Amino acid sequence: MDGPRQDAALDEEEDMVIIYNRVPKTASTSFTNIAYDLCAKNKYHVLHINTTKNNPVMSLQDQVRFVKNITSWKEMKPGFYHGHISYLDFAKFGVKKKPIYINVIRDPIERLVSYYYFLRFGDDYRPGLRRRKQGDKKTFDECVAEGGSDCAPEKLWLQIPFFCGHSSECWNVGSRWAMDQAKYNLINEYFLVGVTEELEDFIMLLEAALPRFFRGATELYRTGKKSHLRKTTEKKLPTKQTIAKLQQSDIWKMENEFYEFALEQFQFIRAHAVREKDGDLYILAQNFFYEKIYPKSN
């Protein structure tokens, strides 16, 4: 009786697919590089989903192709897919076994500031690459003071639509429906959503829950050569006045509400999975067992 069950469990594990639909400037490259560093050792495949002009919304025909690739490309399983795409509901396409979604989000103003300077100065990951706004020396504070388009509150509207998905209303800036849908998807469709500010804890939880992919990830993050860390160059922190001006926007209030919602959920999951001792976090051992099993076997 035990043999076939063990084989079935092994097959299930090898059939696993993770999708990390990364939000730009949330430490996504830093986290993805850990997956690349571990893939050979842990025997899984990592694939980057490269969409034209980084468009997070796929055409209907590309959605069908993507779902078919993910589910039937057996040579690439177990697979870790990552890319700047919005959430896609696989159940709509009649798929029985859905992939596991994970993600990381960030304080919305900090994310926008990082993206603003990234477009102008790049980062230490690919320092020689010319960026779209290269040569523009205007600071983020100056941009906000002048009412510039690159720092407008509308630019904050990104994390909500990434979690909301491919519906038109998701990309309607300031949509209350989109935020509610994003919250629903975060709770019901995502295995785990971390925050940039607590990335190590996110990695630790993934290693504990999905060791098939993330065995060794926490140690690599803590003690590795840090090649996975990526920093935007020339970034200047905004003043309190700039932050206060952005926080007057209804768009910031919604994006921040979503961020706080995600943070609370992540901290709730962490509180039930780890314990702190002498300033360090430790993953809890298995905390349940089976008993009173009937009928009794002879």
Image (cartoon, grey):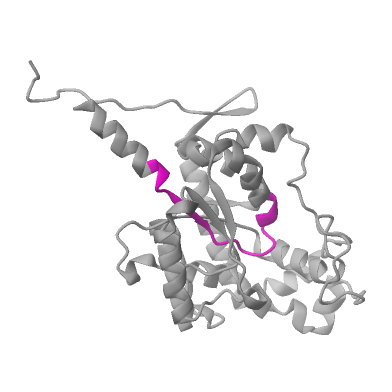
Q: Is residue 253 magenta?
A: no
Residue 170 vs 100, above or below: the answer is below
Residue 279 vs 230, above or below: the answer is above
Q: Quadrant of the N terminus?
A: top left
Q: Quadrant of the C terminus?
A: top left
The residue at 9%/19% (across/down) is 297
Q: Quadrant of residue 142?
A: bottom right
**Picture coordinates of residue 180, whole percent (x, y):** 43, 70
In-front residue for pair 239/121? 121
In-front residue for pair 16/7? 7
**Horizontal placement of 174 versus 220: left or right?**
left
Magenta region, residue range: 13-30
**Picture coordinates of residue 178, whole percent (x, y):** 47, 75
**In the rendered image, is residue 192 in sight?**
no
**In the rendered image, is residue 1 in sight?**
yes
The residue at 55%/52% (across/down) is 263
**Picture coordinates of residue 137, whole percent (x, y):** 92, 74
Looking at this rendering, what residue extends furthest in the top direction?
298
**Picture coordinates of residue 48, whole percent (x, y):** 61, 60
In-front residue for pair 269/191? 191
Q: Quadrant of residue 248?
A: bottom right
Residue 143 vs 76, above or below: the answer is below
**Horizontal placement of 250 versus 135: left or right?**
left
The residue at 66%/65% (across/down) is 24
